[in-house]
Amino acid sequence: SYELTQPPSVSVSPGQTARITCSGDALPKQYTYWYQQKPGQAPVKVMYRDTERPSGIPERFSGSSSGTTVTLTISGVQAEDEADYYCQSIDNSGTYVVFGGGTKLTVL
Amino acid sequence: QVQLQESGPGLVRPSGTLSLTCGVSGASITNRKWWSWVRQSPGKGLEWIGEIYHDGSTNYNPSLKSRVTISVDKSKNQFSLNLSSVTAADTAVYYCAREERTVAGTAFDYWGQGTLVTVSS
């Protein structure tokens, strides 16, 4: 079955830049979406179509894509950004939704 | 504003069937959207279970396909999940969500608050 691979954890100090990667064979052909999830809450979309930011999401969130890897970048990380982040895409057939395993962002 | 609300038993016996319903308000379930179920085991990541369109078309996660049925009730503007032969591994928070599926891919734009279902005797 198709899988998306994320690092389990990323740690940064406030004000630094956090980069969270997501790798998958189908990513050159399928867009990736990113969700932020805080404890006890439903996920919230923070990036769509690899690089587009939904309204209401701070400008410090950005996305990029290169080959089979997409990256969520948070510039000038703030304490409130501490959360789990999940990438999500679809398989090559365009049928099955897939989530990455999630990355826990810790703000030191 | 679109709102989704999960409902159903919080406790299911092993080998039984987990049944949940997602009520949709603020939008018609017959809009050109797909409606999904996603779950999250305690301390674990998100797992897509499956989806349904208002015409009854479905897609299921291959790893769960043999046990999952998703149905839609247009008259009540809701959709439902049945998961059979449950075990402790099915203990999770279950979310319903609305999908925006386009040629550019598919993403979730509205989520329910989630409901914890525990499988235990």
Image: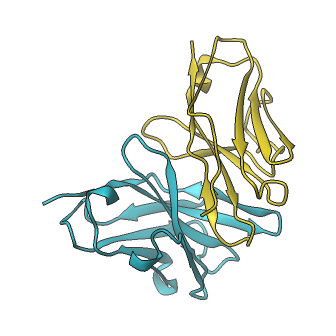
Chain colours: A yellow, B cyan
The answer to whether one can see residue B78 in this image is: yes
Counting from the top left corner in percent of width and height, residue A2 is at 64, 60
Question: How many discs mark residues in the rendered view?
Answer: 0
Nearer to us in this view, A64 or B113: A64
Q: Quadrant of residue A70?
A: top right
Q: Residue at x 45, y 70 (%)?
A: B64
- In the rendered image, residue B25, in percent from the top left (x then y), is placed at 53, 67
> Residue B56 falls in which quadrant of the image?
bottom right
Residue that sits furthest to the left in the current view = B121
Asked whether residue B68 is in view, the answer is no
Q: Image quadrant of residue A58?
A: top right
Q: Quadrant of the N terminus of chain A?
A: bottom right
Q: Is residue A67 left or right of residue A8?
A: right
Looking at the picture, how far across and down is residue B103, in whole percent? 82, 69
Judging depth in this view, the residue of B36 and B67 nearest the camera is B67
Q: Position of residue A89 (x, y in %)?
A: 70, 56
Say left or right for B14 vs A33.
left
* Residue at 63% in and 63% down: A97
- Residue at 67% of width from left, 77% of height from top? B31
Residue A99, compared with residue A54, is above or below; it is below
Residue at the spot x=70%, y=42% of the render?
A: A22
Of the pair A9 and A44, the residue shown nearer to us: A9
